[in-house]
Image (tube, helix red, strand yellow):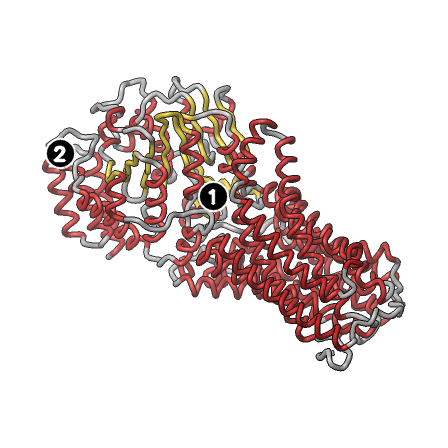
Amino acid sequence: MTSARGGERPAGVLYALAFVSGAAALVYQVAWSSLLSLTFGSSTLAVSAVVAGFMGGMGLGAWGWHRVRGAHRSPLLAYAWLELGIVLSTAVFTRAFVHLPRVFASLAGDLGAGTGFDLARVVGVFGLLLIPAALMGATYPALCMALIRSRQGVDRHLGVIYGLNTVGAALGALLGGFVLVEWLGARGAVTAANGLNFGVALVALRAARRVRGSGAAAEPSDEAIPTALPVLVTALVLFGSGFTTLGYEIVWFRALRYLVGNGTYALTTALVVFLLGLGLGALLYRPLVRRGAPERTLGLSQLAVGLLALAAIGAELWILREPVLRESLSIFSGRVRAQAWTWRLAVGAGVATAVMLPATLAMGLAFPLASRLFLGSVRQVGARVGGAYLLSNLGSISGAIFAAVVVLPALGTLGGTRALAVCNAALGLAVLAFAPRSRVVWVPAGLAAAGVLAGAALLPARLPFAGESGVVRAAPRLLFEQEAEMGTVQVRAAPNGPGRVMTIDGALIAGAGDLIPEIQRKQLLLAHLPIVLAPGPVRTLNVGIASCSTLAALAEHERIEQLDAVEINRAVMYGARLFAESAVLDDPRVTAVVEDAVHFLLRAPRRYDLIVSDGKQNKDFSGNAKILSAEFYAFAAERLSECGTFVQWIPMSNDPVSFELISRTFRHAFPETQIFFDPPESVYMVGSRCALAPRARRGERWDAADPAAALEPYGFRGPDDLLALWVADGDALEAAFGDGPLNGWDRLPVAFAAYRARPSRSGAQALNLGALLDGRAAHGAERSPFEAPGSTRAAVRAKVQVAIRRGFERDFPAARRLVGDALELDPDDPQARWVQSWLRVTERKAS
């Protein structure tokens, strides 16, 4: 069936169209996920709503296909029009997505926060995605009807169409995640996918004309497709296999982050491997169905899914437990982190393939097998294939939401895999109970079922994930762990004493006590530095809660009447209760909300005098690129009072490309920008509409009752010591980095640049600090606006900052001389003394 001339369908051409159309569909999904998260947020609810809207629309489109097919007697011609409809609808709706944040912000004012607004968001995303997604879904039964005219055609084409479409989807995920969104932006990626769909439509129109001219447009036969399965059992398998497949995707992507990290490229690679396995598994349908007894094959495939799923999670458990394997394969090992990004990516792809591919091959076989048994007759192909697609997608939606909202928080990755594997085994046994009897089949089936139960029983309660080795050495005792779609949260404690830390996906985000002093110092500076710069805030907002240290420090300022806090990860809220500072959550002035920060800002009912943003940043974690974006800063600026202040912490060790992008983006949002640097790592970007220098507090010493006196043990004797951290202003940033791209949600270049960063930490610090100092010199703004002309402190600060730069560059003799000169000017300067100690330690490590 490769030519239309002999009265047969152009199968090879239509196979190619299925492949290309699948690629375009995943490009849309990747691009829309980025654009819609600006409107609906990145919380579990928001992501689940987008998945439900996309997959639900596709399922309804497939189900409704046969009801509208009467308008086109030629399914191939109808397919061409569907592809053109996808081009038009995706182009129109993508442009509409840009304006949605404001629409939903106004709705928030009318509906308020809570269930009503959440329901409006879910209904809204479903309605927005319904038309384009329904058109995409309808293409599957249209292609099936165009190719399948006989029972032989069912066996020949059903699995190939679905398989090639899914393999094409894997390619689309690869292109979208690695190339199109970064190079063209989300809207540009949609335009590229429009080109693919338009090309598919043109080829389909030409093929339809050839088929019509050849007289090959015969109606499908009345051949029955017998099955031993009751239709309800088949429907249950379609729904159940869809449920477990998306459940595994959610659970395994969480588990794989313990090995491959949370970077954009790593997550895209995992998605590509998952889709590729499903597609290749579907392509096994044709050779297997020729052997007969598809019911037995379907039942055994479900048992195989359960067994291979347990083997997959068992393989990861083995890697995490085995030191040699963990050191060679985990992104959290120093050996892997030190490699180039291409090597890290290759290792991650290999791990994802070894863990997921065998099980996903068996998963991919389930849909075409169950669809065949659901058909009834060849004449019902259009209606029944669409119904099978809807049932599978409804299961997928339920599985994705249930896994994210219930399974991960309650059972974790191991418990979730265990439960899903048992579901697959139950489905397999249910199918085999109705399949033609065969002792030969029941022996392997019994062994497989026993293997699933034994594997489920033998798995431990949790994966032994530790994260960064330095954190584990300092805090080996695990007090709390919860796996969630937004990140795995751990609270760890020192062997002795009260010191505690919190990590998300292995990255350190908070601490208490003297366990890691740099973290506690950062948390206190985030609270007190902006209040020294702009005294007297009344309403504040914390983006991120972590250990509650910053929030508790702000609460010590009695003039503050309202302290709001927004945290996207509910598990962080639970873990925070293990820190003494969490007592602040019981302060009547505090309102803590679990919500996406961007969406919170869009609907926030009040304006703030101070907003503090402290999201974790790591080259192997891309999630917080969104809250380092032009859109986030613009929304935050709108929620500030007239002279309100915004403070953003970023690490000096950010790769230079990301550091430049973030700096330029921040400067673009705030007319008044001042940069402060607390060596060796913490950069504080402070923005406002009003000049900060005239408002800043001065003084050599803290007042006895001043909450900021908590900084004195860290060498900050008074406001002047905090102001001495100044390193550059907005004009210096412009001189250093000039005009160029911003970190916007259409492209999010920070998410890509961070993963590709060179592994040298000190090299990045040297380049970033050097850029700030050189920009300041080029602009001619060497003197801090917060210091009096000719002050000794100004001269000390300048020498100390250059000394730090030389230390980053490993020019230790020059660094020591500069620090010595600074201490001659002021022997008691705390920053100079700290840098002197830091240089000794750094030089000793370097040697």
Residue 788 appears in view: yes
Q: Position of residue 143 (x, y in %)?
A: 72, 65
Residue at mark 2: 826
Q: Is residue 790 above or below residue 752?
A: above
Residue drawn 27% across the image and 24% down it: 695
| 354 sits left or right of 517 in the view | right
| Labelled pair 1, 2 in contact (Cβ < 8 Å) | no
Q: Position of residue 95 (x, y in %)?
A: 53, 47
Q: Is residue 636 above or below residue 131?
A: above
Q: Is residue 357 above or below residue 493?
A: below
To which quarter of the image does residue 270 belong? bottom right
* Frontmost residue, 28 versus 515: 28
* Frontmost residue, 492 versus 835: 835
Residue at mark 1: 503
Crowding around mark 2 (Cα neighbors within 10 Å: few <14, some 14 to 19, many 20+) is some
Q: Quadrant where the N terminus lies?
A: bottom right
* Frontmost residue, 570 versus 728: 728
Quick one: SS at disc 2?
loop
Q: CA distance from mark 1 to mark 2?
A: 39 Å
Q: Position of residue 160 (x, y in %)?
A: 70, 70
Quick one: SS at disc 1?
strand
Give the residue type at disc 1.
Thr
Give the residue type at disc 2.
Asp
